[in-house]
Image: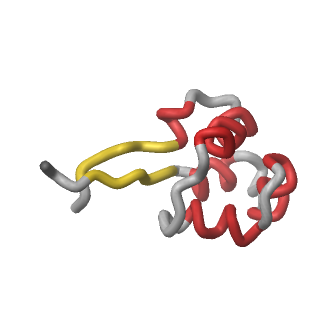
Amino acid sequence: MTDRVITNSIRTLRFLNNEMTQKQLAEAIGVTRQTVMAIEANKYSPSLEVAFKIAEVFSLPLEEVFQYKEAE
């Protein structure tokens, strides 16, 4: 079985959304800035609830924010 990883486009989405800061995103979804930083850096996979909240902030479907693909 091939290893798969979850990646995301949060940093790009923040930039495209009036250069939203990690702190602003964290406040919008109810987590710490450190949590957003870890998710954005792919060091931590968010809970399903947090993932949906992030997608909601950007008004996008979940699969446009997070991708599940084969590890490189």
What is the total number of numbered labels drawn onto the structure image? 0
Hey, which residue is sitting farthest left in the picture? 1
Q: Colour scheme in the image? A: secondary structure
Residue depicted at x 71% and y 71%: 34
In this rendered view, identify the residue nearer to me: 65 or 48.
48
**Figure check: 63 above or below 1:** above
Residue depicted at x 16% and y 51%: 2
Residue depicted at x 59% and y 40%: 48
Q: Is residue 26 left or right of residue 71?
A: right
In this rendered view, identify the residue nearer to me: 10 or 53.
53
The picture quadrant where one finds residue 15 is bottom right
The picture places residue 17, in percent across and down from the top left corner, at 73, 46
**Figure check: 72 above or below 1:** below
Q: Is residue 61 left or right of residue 53?
A: left
Dividing the image into 4 quarters, which one contains the C terminus? bottom left
The picture places residue 6, in percent across and down from the top left corner, at 41, 51
**Figure check: 9 above or below 23:** above
The picture places residue 60, in percent across and down from the top left corner, at 62, 30
In this rendered view, identify the residue nearer to me: 53 or 60.
53
Residue depicted at x 65% and y 36%: 52
Q: Is residue 69 left or right of residue 14?
A: left
The picture quadrant where one finds residue 53 is top right
The picture places residue 30, in percent across and down from the top left corner, at 83, 51
